[in-house]
Amino acid sequence: MASLQISGGSVRFEPLVGFNRTGCVHPIGSLGFPHYRRRFSIGRPLLLRCSSVSGESQTDDITDAQRDASLLGFQLPPPGDQELFGTSTKEATHQEENSDATDEAEMADFGVPGNRAVEEGAAEVAHTSVKAEVINNLVFVTSEAAPYSKTGGLGDVCGSLPIALAGRGHRVMVISPRYLNGTSADKNYAGAKDLGVRVTVHCFGASQEVSFYHEYRDGVDWVFIDHQSYHRPGNPYGDSKGAFGDNQFRFTLLCHAACEAPLVLPLGGFTYGEKSLFLVNDWHAGLVPILLAAKYRPYGVYKDARSILIIHNLAHQGVEPAATYSNLGLPSEWYGAVGWVFPTWARTHALDTGEAVNVLKGAIVTSDRIITVSQGYAWEITTVEGGYGLQDLLSSRKSVINGITNGINIDEWDPSKDEHIPFHYSLDDYSNKVKCKMALQKELGLPIRPECPMIGFIGRLDYQKGIDLIQNAGHDLMVDDIQFVMLGSGDPKCESWMRSMEETYRDKFRGWVGFNVPISHRITAGCDILLMPSRFEPCGLNQLYAMRYGTIPVVHATGGLRDTVENFNPYAEGGAGAGTGWVFSPLSKDSMVSALRLAAATYREYKESWEGLMRRGMCRNYSWENAAVQYEQVFQWVFMDPPYIK
Ligand SMILES: Nc1ncnc2c1ncn2[C@@H]1O[C@H](COP(=O)(O)OP(=O)(O)O[C@H]2O[C@H](CO)[C@@H](O)[C@H](O)[C@H]2O)[C@@H](O)[C@H]1O
């Protein structure tokens, strides 16, 4: 195994086992890149040995939170990952202390004026519908947008940020595929009507006809690209057998069609036109800025358009064999934009040249600006630990990268009116929160013990989310008088670990395998503590939901988690205390368990401190309004400069 020296310490590359469902698009054996890793499981909610649980299970809905066929296999552990990678705690902590001040200063470079997210009492901002000073035609391109399609945070963001921007006066279109999987989820598209516009896309050596469906809702034009490749069982990226083998085709089609939409769709009687600003979300939309530069601008089209790449997760890059370049519908001389060569250590045999096409890389080098979903993550992606091989390119574009912390849908996530929870509460009176906990304990078949600290975890069972840490700490945690509930799907090994934990600790542990929105709300409301030991976290939404619900987050100090959760300090403010949760570091079992124990002890013995934590979290302003103002600042900047690629 190759190793790489970083800042005097040693971190280890860990090539992963390759995986491709069809084997025909990027056969691991022939190409030899160990970077195609998918961990799919059937997203069938399966309550583990807990027959008393009820609730809406979404067996027929978008299920697994896995993203696509294109997870890059560099797993560069952060410097704090000493327990798993052999650095001592002392060393790691020392290194962190030394680098903290520098990190903070460097992170500040990525900020955008107007961030009021951390101001207490700023909740009022949430409902002020101030209009933007400059109005733009915005075109979001995304592989998912809630409530139509969602497997994770990308869907949440693309389902709510556009509405906030439309509320501020922008003309906003969101373009995503019209997924039909033969389940009740298909009714999500019931309100979208065929516009009768057909476009022929030339890619993959053929002509493909796509049509456009449209629904105008909440001030936003929701546009769905229709093609038979989006109609199949499973979630947007795959099914129980793994990622779809034709994802490169499906998202190439999305990008080509998305570029045509502002030119050809007379929405409300008028097209969006050439002066549109494309908001390109993750690799699935990554061809858009390349097409603008390579296919349109040379012919005088979209000269006034701009594009902003929004990175929600750099680990997914849309990497396929170099031979697939001709499928993308790009002129041959543009290969350099997406061409990518893997380092020698990542190749499996001597004849493997490591050549590939990397769509996200292409977007990084052609988009006009780049936004990531937190300031901390904006900095992390320019480092070797967080850059997933793209850190040098990203660093070269540092001057146009900004971090803007996500907001949340404060109507959907509101404990005073949440339709999924049995009792409602608010900052003024949160006495019903404990009733939510007791109802959750009953629903899960756990002993009903209002005084027992209850810890929750919600998320993809994935390396990113630090599930290995939870697994390592499981038995240690069960020694304590706590209850623990996990909701998620993904890694089959973790799913079976959850099963065995539930069998062993029937009075303390519950696991729910699957994707279930109502349960996620009930866990957020019912638990006292929400655990997020993410290895990296571009923003993270669950900690924001948790704080709004008076549930105290215990998080690893990374990316958006570090930006949004303030570590508890009982002595601050003349003894009144400050902070909204526990932010632990380094990423180790011991430091996670200590933080959880501290949290549980505070919950049991220091009620006043606990309520202070709850109140401070519930007071924060997580509205999209706050983020929207910062996005507008970046919109202004992007139009000040000429197109990056003319
Ligand atoms: N089993 C389950 N059942 C029901 N709901 C479930 C679920 N598993 C996850 N969810 C929901 O899916 C969303 C996950 O959002 P996150 O931001 O935590 O992560 P994700 O890694 O998908 O998103 C990426 O994009 C987002 C958006 O930018 C970034 O915040 C994040 O850091 C980045 O990794 C939340 O709404 C959560 O409640």
Image (cartoon, grey):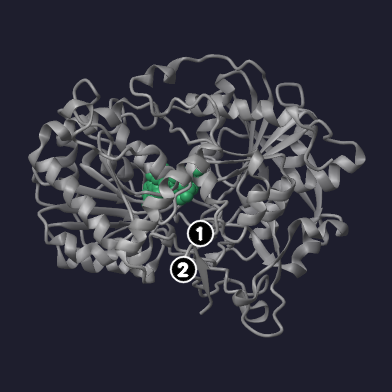
Disc ID at residue 274: none
At 51% from the left edge and 29% from the top edge, which residue is drawn? 627
At 77% from the left edge and 33% from the top edge, which residue is drawn? 305
Residue 640 appears at what percent x and percent y? 74, 27
At 67% from the left edge and 19% from the top edge, which residue is drawn? 135
| Of residues 430 and 616, the one drawn nearer to the viewer in this rendering | 616
SS under mark 1 = loop
Q: Considering only order in the chain, which callout, 2 or 1, is on the residue closer to the N terminus?
A: 2
Q: Disc 2 marks which residue? A: 11
Left or right: where does residue 637 sit relative to residue 509? right
The answer to whether the beta carbon of the residue marked 1 is less than 8 Å from any atom of ligand 1 is no
Residue 333 appears at what percent x and percent y? 87, 58
Type of amino acid under label 2 = Val
Q: Quadrant of residue 214?
A: top right
Q: Disc 1 marks which residue? A: 385
| Of residues 311 and 98, the one drawn nearer to the viewer in this rendering | 98
Q: Residues within 10 Å of mark 2 (few under 14, many from 20)?
A: many
Instruction: Tell me the distance, in whole angstroms, between the alpha carbons under discs 1 and 2.
Output: 9 Å
At 74% from the left edge and 58% from the top edge, which residue is drawn? 338
Q: Is residue 252 above or below residue 87?
A: above
Type of amino acid under label 1 = Glu
User: Mark 1 near mark 2, Cβ–Cβ under 8 Å?
Assistant: yes
Q: Is residue 180 above or below residue 188?
A: below
Q: Is residue 508 above or below residue 215?
A: below
Q: Where's the C terminus, which quadrant?
A: top right
| Of residues 20 and 147, the one drawn nearer to the viewer in this rendering | 20
The answer to whether the beta carbon of the residue marked 2 is less than 8 Å from any atom of ligand 1 is no
